[in-house]
Amino acid sequence: MTAFVVVGAGVAGATAAAKVREEGFDGELVLIGAETMAPYERPPLSKEYLRGESDHHFVRPPEWYAEHQIDARFGAKAERVNVSDRVVELEGGERVPFDQVVIATGARNRRPKIDGLDLPGVFDLRFAPDADAIKRAAKEGSKAVMVGMGFIGAEVAASLRQLGLDVTVVEFFGTPLERVLGPTLGGAIESLHRDHGVEMIFRDGAERFEGDGRFEAMITKEGRRIEGDFAVVGVGVEPVTEVADGGVPVDNGIPVDASLRTSAEGVWAIGDVARHDHPVFGPIRVEHFDNALKMGEHVAKNLLGTPAAFDDAHWFWSDQYDAEIQMAGFATEWDDMVVRGSIEDRSFSAFLLKDGRLLSTFSMNRKFDVRRSMPLIAAKAHPDGRQLADPEFDLRQLHPPKEQAT
Amino acid sequence: MAEWVRVGSAGSVPEGEITAFAAGERQVAVANVEGDLHAFDDTCTHQQCSLAEGELDGTTVECACHGSLFDVITGEAIGGPAVDPVGVFEVKEEDGELKVLVDEE
């Protein structure tokens, strides 16, 4: 009997395993994940889950895997994908044979070399228990000291303010998210947080954390001393690639071709760990929920049929206070930004273009522009700037004709 | 017991659009696909967003919150994070009224 093994049980891996079964695969199917809890969605951990407004959202109900003859090994650590022996080696010595294996080991938080990072009361956020720890510490009226204002940092800052905490954030760049969004859009995020009472210190970083057995203060590189009840560090992630040591190449993640195949026969990689040769953007490693989900669905189809290129234009959302933020596409540099709506009123979309080509769309409180621009990004379209700027213009009019569904 | 409930006036859902109506305790979305009306539960099974705020593309509605996709005819979840289907209801326009067949709760 054919055996598929999925290593990593986050959204990408769990979706891949579920979809393979749902698409009719009746061979052996093993899903190996280091976390003991059944696979769950991570986006709520910095938002509604952290604020105690929702419980976990499971990828499938916890009992679903056994009901569908998936050998789910939650809480099991895969040490190596041994390509020549065609087995996944688990901690403890067990060897799980595969015909095809999907690596979906995800990413882990970067742990910068900061003195006192291991002090109790210094948190980071990646997994459900991390969110639980922050929740326990986040008592109304207490004070949080944060490092980093990327998307996770910005969302945690918003949630903590909503819970009634004082929040001070230190950020290396000149605005939140400046590296990703540039100073204008980063400034829009800054103003949002400023209005909600977050104290932000830019162009500074953490030098060390101090405390007598528990976090009491952060000393910054510029010499500030910021006291608080606990700290949250959010300074990015790195791909988890150790399992590839057994014969799968690694280079800033696990490189895969457009169809999600590694260069090792029968070995695929998806989700945050995959550095994907994207047909539109070129080699790119994406750390967002929707990409993990869609790659999981896609690799399932590729495992069962003729491999096809994955060409999703990438999309994610970030809710902060009452601002609904969305973004699609990918741009490291752009020479034109067309704005539709009003940045000041926090109801706008910003289209990032290079040489006239639409690379990425960012929006705040405008529901449709981002998703309607995705077919344009995927088609490498050069849309008219006046149409982009016109709030009345429906971007669907620019969509390329649809291919017939197969 | 199922019962036809008036939710609005005939013609109140323009072609290509979705509108949410209260039908007793429920919130029901009615989509107009090229003149054919389809009624379904307005609440996305992923995180309870209103599907009427989503985008209709052919017979597929895309939730505006997180991109879950549902077939408006069958209610089936066909993509995105939602797994469970939404309920579907019979819908008709009669005597100038828009009516949906819902179960008494």
Image (spheres, helix red, strand yellow):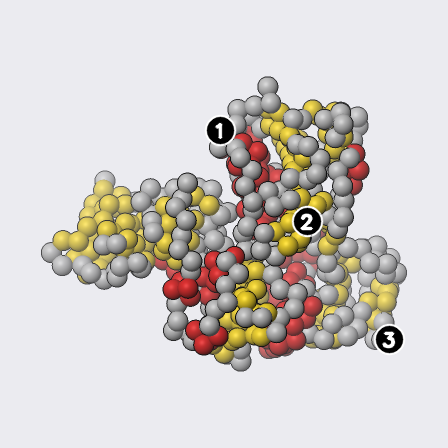
- Residue placed under numbered mark 3 in the picture: A223
Q: In the picture, residue A307 is in which quadrant? A: top right
Q: Marks 1 and 2, how far apart in space?
A: 28 Å
Depth check: give the residue in front, A29 or A264.
A264
The reply to whether dot 3 and dot 1 touch (C-beta < 8 Å) is: no
- Residue placed under numbered mark 2 in the picture: A275
Task: From the image, state whether disc 1 or disc 2 is nearer to you.
Answer: 2
The percent position of residue A161, horizontal first and vertical second, equals: 63, 68
Q: Provide the chain ID for the residue under circle 3.
A: A
To the question of a shared chain for discs 3 and 1, the answer is: yes
Whether residue A33 is situated above or below residue A155 in the rendered picture: above
The percent position of residue A87, horizontal first and vertical second, equals: 73, 26
Q: In the picture, residue A401 is in which quadrant? A: bottom left
| Badge 3: residue crowd in 10 Å (few <14, some 14–19, many ≥20) | few
Instruction: In the rendered structure, find residue A24 and report the number of the disc placed on it.
Output: 1
Depth check: give the residue in front, A383 or A362.
A383
Q: In the picture, residue A88 is in which quadrant? A: top right
Mark sitting earlier along the chain (1/2): 1
Image quadrant in which the N terminus of chain A is located: top right
Q: Marks 3 and 1, how far apart in space?
A: 61 Å
- Amino acid type of the residue that numbered disc 2 sits on in the rendered structure: Arg
Q: Is residue A398 visible?
A: yes
Instruction: In the rendered structure, find residue A237 and report the number of the disc placed on it.
Output: none
